[in-house]
Amino acid sequence: MLIGCSAAHNTKVRDKIAEGYGNGDNRKKVVVKTKSEIEKQNKPIVEKTILSKPANPLLKKEETEILVATSNISVSKNTVEEYIGLYAPVAMQSMKTYGIPASIKLAQGILESGSGNGTLCRTANNHFGIKCKDEWLGETVSHTDDAPDECFRKYHSALESYNDHSEFLANRVYYKNLFTLDQSDYTAWAKGLKKAGYATDPRYPQKLISIIERYKLYEYDQKVLGSNYHFTPKSIETTNNLLAQNSSSYTVQPGDTLFAISQKFNSTVDNLKQLNNLKSNNLSVGQTIKIQ
């Protein structure tokens, strides 16, 4: 505190100190602040929120599909890709241990669990829609599938579900013929699962094959088998181009969505809606729609 000086003198001295007057190398600069400046400093700082662009932006609302197995849920392409990224390493390890193609395991997980968002998956960690059966001694949960309140296996984790799925296929007599198939041939495995009674849906093989080809899940089989990979999958892009060239209309099949059809024919949802004067994305089985 400055003592024995006039108020005017005090002000001049204070100004000189603030300006660094007589400032030597070893002197500390002192800044004298006014009352209003101190009040300003004590005011809370409101930071402006900066919204960064998502690394993997969400698709438009209409760019979704319905996965129907033990789930019945609408999912985006991003949701499926996130699921694949999470469980592909587990599927590849299972392929090395049990011989079940990683592509098949991932496709079943995606379809049966609704990419991890289906009710059975969320409540019981059941990614493959496996029912209790007589030998199951673990926890159970009731879920309506082919009939009301059926008994399904409940797991403590997704990893436990993935492991049990491998054991389920490897140790049941119904599925023994699957393990005589080429591990590269996901088409044969998809059809073999239906024939062995894994699912009651008559289009189960087509749904698995569609998922495998759209998301190129066969690439994980290639990684595991390396030079032993013999199957040459039909490029879905090539298939779609041929369909688009040879077709001007399409008949809606069970399980089809407008988005899935647009992908099959290298089109867009908006384009198909415009061509067919559709007011919504709803389709009816047997309905014929224009493709081009």
Image (cartoon, grey):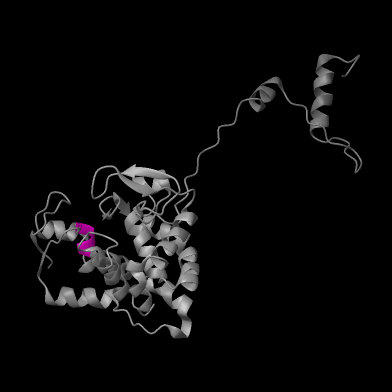
Q: Quadrant of the N terminus?
A: top right
Residue 59 can be seen in this image: no
Q: Magenta stretch: dominant SS?
A: helix
In the image, residue 216 sits, relative to residue 165, either above or below, namely: below
From the viewer's perspective, is 132 left or right of 238? right
In the image, residue 255 sits, relative to residue 122, either above or below, namely: below
Please name whichever residue, 2 or 67, is drawn nearer the observer in this view of the structure: 67
Magenta stretch contains residue 243: no
Q: Quadrant of the C terminus?
A: bottom left
Query: Looking at the picture, how far across and down is residue 105, in whole percent?
Result: 39, 65
Query: Looking at the picture, how far across and down is residue 9, in whole percent?
Result: 84, 19
Residue 13 can be seen in this image: yes
Magenta stretch contains residue 259: yes
Q: Quadrant of residue 109?
A: bottom left
From the viewer's perspective, is 110 left or right of 7? left
Q: Quadrant of residue 269?
A: bottom left
Identify the residue at the far front of this view: 134
Please name whichever residue, 15 or 190, is drawn nearer the observer in this view of the structure: 190
Residue at 90% x, 41% y: name it. Answer: 24
What residue span does the magenta drawing correspond to?
257-262
In the image, residue 290 sits, relative to residue 71, either above or below, namely: below
Query: Looking at the picture, how far across and down is residue 192, in whole percent?
Result: 29, 71
Residue at 26% x, 66% y: name it. Answer: 194
Query: Looking at the picture, how far across and down is residue 259, in whole percent?
Result: 23, 59
Please name whichever residue, 109 or 214, is drawn nearer the observer in this view of the structure: 109
Residue at 27% x, 74% y: name it. Answer: 237
Please name whichever residue, 278 or 7, is drawn nearer the observer in this view of the structure: 278
In the image, residue 128 sits, relative to residue 17, either above or below, namely: below
